[in-house]
Image: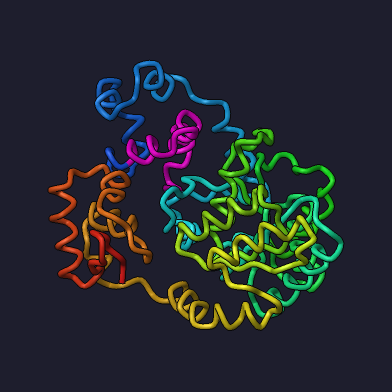
Amino acid sequence: MQKDLPDFLQLYHCLHTSRARLFQLLQGFGGSARQVLRSSPASLRACGIDQRTAARILYRRRPEVDTDLEWADQDGNHLICYDDPAYPPLLRQISDPPILLYAKGNPDALLAPQIAIVGSRKCTPGGAQNAGDFAMQCAAAGLVVTSGLALGIDAAAHRGAVDIGGATVAVTGAGLKQVYPWRNRKLAGDILQQGALVSEFPLDAVARPANFPQRNRIISGLAIATLVVEATERSGSLITARLAAEQGREVMAVPGSIHNPQARGCHRLIRDGATLVEGVQDIAAQLDGLLDYVRQQQSAPVNARDTELDAEHRDLLESIGYDPVHCDLLVQRSGLTIDKLSSMLVTLELDDLIQSAPGGCYVRI
C-alpha cells in the first residue's frame, strides 16, 4: 500500500466514516487504491458508491492528503495502512479493524505483546496507585502497557510504565495534532520516549463523545488482555472489556470495597466471568501460555505456502486471522459470493493454512 499511499489517503479521507465501504471498494479493485482512482464513475457506482461521492473520489483531491504526507515526513510520525507489515497483527484480527493508523513515536511498541489497563476517569487515590503498580510490574515483565490517555486510571497506567522505563501505547479519541485531554500533554510527551501515541482519526479531528467507544475497540484489539482497575457500572471501561471479550481476548478485573461505587463495574465483570486479579501473579498465571503463543506468532517466519497463493487467496487468508471467524463475516470482509468463498476456503484448508471450527467458522493455523 505504501507505493500508492497518496491514492490510498484520497480514498481514506473520502470514505473514512464508512470503513466497511472503504474495505469493500478496495477489495473490488484488487486492493489497489490506484486502480480505484483510475476507474470510472460507473465502476464506482457498481461498487455501491453514490454519484456525489464518486465525483469527490475521482476529481477533487482532498487537501488532507498533502497534510498527512507532510506530517508523515516529520521524524517520529508514521502512517500505518492495514496491509503494511508494521500494522499490529492482533489488531488486524478483530472484526472491525481500523484501515489506517496515525502513530507518533516508536511504532515497534505496537508490535510487542500488550496489556490494556483501563478504568474510571474519576478514580480513587487507591485505584490510581493500583493502576500504576500493575503497569510498572507488567512493563518490567516486558509487556507494553496500552490505555487511552484519559484522566484517572488511564493516566496512572501510562505513568507507571513510563516511570520504570517501559513502553506504553496511548490510543487517543482525537487527531494527533492535539493532545486530548490537554492536562495530559506532559504525559503524552513522556510516552513518546519509549512508546507511541496512536489514533485512527484524521490529524485535525477533535474529541467527540462518539469517538471514544470507537477508540476502545483499538485499545482492546491491540492487547492480549484487558485489565479493568476501577469502574462504575456505567463506565466506558466496561465497553472496552466487552469488546475485549468479543475479540476473544482475556478480561481481568481488580476487586474493591463493596462500599466503593468505583468498584461496582469490576465486581460485575468478575460475576460475568472476568479473572479476579489481586496481584501481578494472577496476570502472569492467566497469560503465561498465551504470551508464548503470541510471541511465537510475531517472530515466526512467513509461511512459504502463503507466498505461493495468488493475491485473492492471500487477501482471504489475511481476513481469517487466528481467531474463529464465521463465513457470513468473511463474505462481508471479502466481498466474495458465498460460492466463490466456499471454493477458496476449501483450497486454503487443503493447503493446511486454515481449518474449520464449530458453528460454520474457520481459523488460521
Residue at position x 74%, y 50% in the image: 150
Name the spot of residue 52 as percent of width and height, x first.
Answer: 40, 16
Q: Quadrant of residue 254?
A: bottom right
Name the spot of residue 18 as percent of width and height, x first.
Answer: 44, 34
Name the spot of residue 22 as percent of width and height, x first.
Answer: 39, 36
Furthest residue in direction right, as rendered: 125
Closer to the camera in the image, 327 or 351: 327
Decide: is 338 above or below 135. above
Main secondary structure found in the magenta portion:
helix
Q: Which quarter of the rendering shows the C terminus?
A: bottom left
Q: Which residues are magenta?
A: 1-26
Q: Quadrant of residue 59?
A: top left
Residue at position x 43%, y 20% in the image: 56
Decide: is 172 above or below 250. above
Decide: is 254 above or below 339. below
Furthest residue in direction top, as rendered: 52
Residue 325 seen in the figure? yes
Decide: is 133 above or below 218. below
Q: Quadrant of residue 39?
A: top left
Closer to the camera in the image, 336 or 313: 336
Q: Is residue 20 magenta?
A: yes
Residue at position x 49%, y 34% in the image: 16
Residue 169 seen in the figure? no
> How many numbered tags mark residues here?
0
Closer to the camera in the image, 260 or 189: 260
Closer to the camera in the image, 174 or 209: 209
Q: Is residue 355 magenta?
A: no
**Which color mode does the image show?**
rainbow
Name the spot of residue 81 as percent of width and height, x first.
Answer: 48, 49
Residue at position x 31%, y 49% in the image: 329
